[in-house]
Amino acid sequence: MGTLNYHHLRLFQAVAREGNLTRASKQLHLTPQTVSTQIRDLEAALGERLFQRIGRRMFLTEAGQVALRYANEIFSLGQEFQETLRGRPTGHPPRILVGAADVLPKLIVHRLIEPALRLNEPIQLVCQEGTPTELLADLAVHRLDVVLSDTPIPPTVNVRAYNHLLGTCGVTFMAQPKLGRRLRRRFPESLDGAPVLLPIDDAVLRRLLDGWFDSCGVRPVIVGEFEDSALLKSFGQAGEGFFAIPTVVEEEVARQYEVEAIGQTEEVTESFYAISVERRVRHPAVAAICDAARFELFA
């Protein structure tokens, strides 16, 4: 086996990520012929084929899948090494690149990130939203420093990363005051036949709520199902139905949406995670998020 060329390995990682030689070449500002030649050189050095071409798509072979896992880890360690020795660039604030799962309530995302903005050294926040799978893919190639989610890394996602449990909490049911006064009496029996606003079917909280309603023997009438939690709360503010939120943001939701609590349960619990490529968190802003969540928000 020849000496490993890390430049060739970086090109391989880009093609593996895109699954297409032409798109990867444009991102790398190289010609497809150059990229193809250097990947062949890498395959020759390793003594293994890394890709199988089907049409215009490039699919990883079994050896290619192994190579990609090691490439991701190698470049992750390289980035940590550089940051440890050289620190963050001077002349402008350091950045934290946060991915927030689109199912997380916006108030929870703000409460989780806020401690990073209170550090003594100013920091620039870059926050993007997406599905956990999309965000974990960006995390794997260091486009993000941390992913915030309500689930750990799914076993089907092939990403070398680590779950950091931030905390868990029960849920509080909220409603517009007029509806809330009626539902507060004889809670939770009062929820039977009451209008409810729920997350969409594949949301973790939705599955937990459905199970809890069954265990209580109540069947609320589903008025609406929402992917966006802020939109769901807006409908709740208008009196269209009651809804559930993480108890830790009860006061903020009550104030912002002019709704009231009608009851709580610890039988339905939501968990929140920070996911990073570091087993031990070194990024100061990510560490601030984790520490504040564990010792303040969910204490």
Image: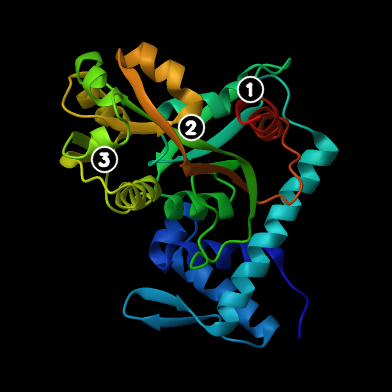
**Label 1: few (<14), some (14–19) or many (≥20) C-alpha neighbours in 10 Å:** some
Considering every residue shown, the one lying at the far bottom of the view is 47
Q: Contact, CB < 8 Å: mark 2 with mark 1?
A: no
The colour scheme applied to this rendered structure is: rainbow
Is residue 29 in view from this perspective? no
Query: Which dot, 2 or 3, sits closer to the camera?
Result: 3
Closer to the chain start, of discs 2 and 3, is 2
Q: Name the residue under label 2.
A: 127
Q: Does 110 sit left or right of 115 as displayed? A: left
Q: Name the residue under label 3.
A: 198
State the quadrant of the N terminus.
Answer: bottom right
Residue 162 in picture, x, y percent from top left: 65, 54
- Count of residue discs: 3
Q: Mark 1 points at which residue?
A: 115
Please give the name of the residue rendered at 36% of the width and 74% of the height, measured from the top-left corner. 57
- Which residue occupies the foreground of this view, 8 or 181? 181
- Circle 3 sits in a helix, a strand or a loop, which is it? strand
- Circle 2 sits in a helix, a strand or a loop, which is it? strand
Please give the name of the residue rendered at 51% of the width and 26% of the height, measured from the top-left corner. 248
Above or below residue 101? Residue 155 is below
Amino acid of disc 3: Leu
